[in-house]
Amino acid sequence: MDAQKYLWEGAIPLQIHLHESQVTALPPPPPALILAPRIGYLPLLAPLIKPYFSSTLPPGVDTIWFDYNGLPLKWYIPTGVLFDLLCPEPERPWNITVHFRGYPGNVLIPCEGEDYVKWSFINSLKEAAYIMNGNCKNVMNMSQSDQLELWNSVLNGNLEAYQRVSSKLKLATVDEYTSLCSPKSQQSLGETDLTAQLKTGRVPVRLYLLSVREDFDDLDEVHPIDSWEKISYINRPVEIRKEDKCFSLHDALKTLLPELFSDESLTDVKLSGVDFEDAVRKPNEDVSSDKVMEDQGQNAYKQPEAGHVSSSAEIKLIRIQGIEPKLEIPFSWVANNLINPDHFLHICVYVKVAQ
């Protein structure tokens, strides 16, 4: 519970610059300094940012979007995940640029306000429910008042309100088991109360994999990401069974990334799985039947075979909610404590591959 509380209170310090092409007054406005919730989404900052820069904007229709080092930021990825993924060496404050014109429709799917973010979140929750329960009826049958309360709890970072409403969804969790996966991890992690509650079922996961070819020793030597095509996505549930009492994060990664545990080189690997952009729809394209979720869920259920670690690849970084966990940590603790409000666990992985 304490870990979830810290997660919901977590924030990324942002220093937001207005793009120089949209500055119409001198001197140009200073950057806006904002604490952005980790579990939130960048477009939800618009009510704070637009008034701050309004006096210097050119005339026209406002469509807000952000970039980091010239890379348009995907608005449906939680802010904390974007930071973990794009800043291997954390940059505080995180300097990003806001635009109110010239929306890059060739890179970003449309977002015309809070409703688009809300329905992206709800559709993601439906997908997670299908993975966990085999259907998403409880999410689809939510009353309008519960749906609004759930969304407002995410907007306001209200964990108690969120737990009160989300408990009605009855997303599958079974049994509890207290264990750490090795005596070594018990010694190093025991003082921080990392007791694991074993879930019997599937854990929805979104994994982001960046394969880096240049040689580097420190993370601050990694070149900035300039294209989303350099990042591989995988949507694949991790199944924890009752007998897996010492199922660790390492075991989960073997399930998620079989390419890292085989002789196959990572340099030309195309990861399989469900591209979650397919689940991000405009409000009038809401997922309205279990059939859509069934198609996505069945694809996500395909389990890869695990092998041994490829000699051509080396994991340099694993980051979940700003934490770089040890591989022997129980995956059940990770799944119980570090999931986002949409019930997905977001994992960022940097891999160094042979040049």
Image (tube, grey):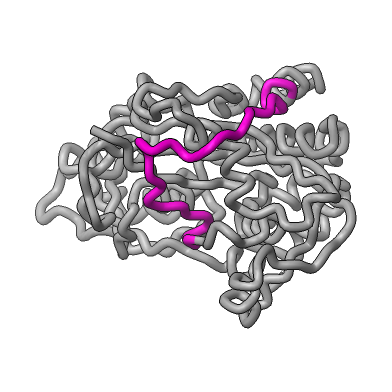
Q: Does 223 sit left or right of 341 as displayed?
A: left
Of residue 326 and residue 347, the one placed in the foreground of this image is 326
Pinpoint residue 44: horizontal percent, then vertical percent: 50, 48
Magenta residue check for 2: no
- Above or below residue 130? Residue 218 is below
Q: Quadrant of residue 229?
A: top left
Q: How many marks?
A: 0
Pinpoint residue 96: horizontal percent, then vertical percent: 29, 50
- Above or below residue 88? Residue 210 is above
Q: Which residue is most to the left?
A: 26
Of residue 30 and residue 175, the one placed in the foreground of this image is 175
Q: Quadrant of residue 160?
A: bottom right
Whether residue 247 is visible: yes
Q: What's drawn in magenta, residue-wise?
A: 298-324
Pinpoint residue 149: horizontal percent, then vertical percent: 75, 52
Q: Quadrant of the C terminus?
A: top left
Q: Who's the residue at 60% across and 34% down the image?
A: 306
- Above or below residue 170? Residue 293 is above
**Magenta-colored segment: predominant secondary structure:** loop
Q: Who's the residue at 46% across and 44% down the image?
A: 43
Q: Which residue is most to the bottom?
A: 191
Q: Who's the residue at 49% across and 62% down the image?
A: 323
Whether residue 56 is visible: no
Of residue 247 and residue 322, the one placed in the foreground of this image is 247
Pinpoint residue 317: horizontal percent, then vertical percent: 40, 52
Q: Quadrant of the N terminus?
A: bottom right
Q: Who's the residue at 57% across and 76% down the image?
A: 188
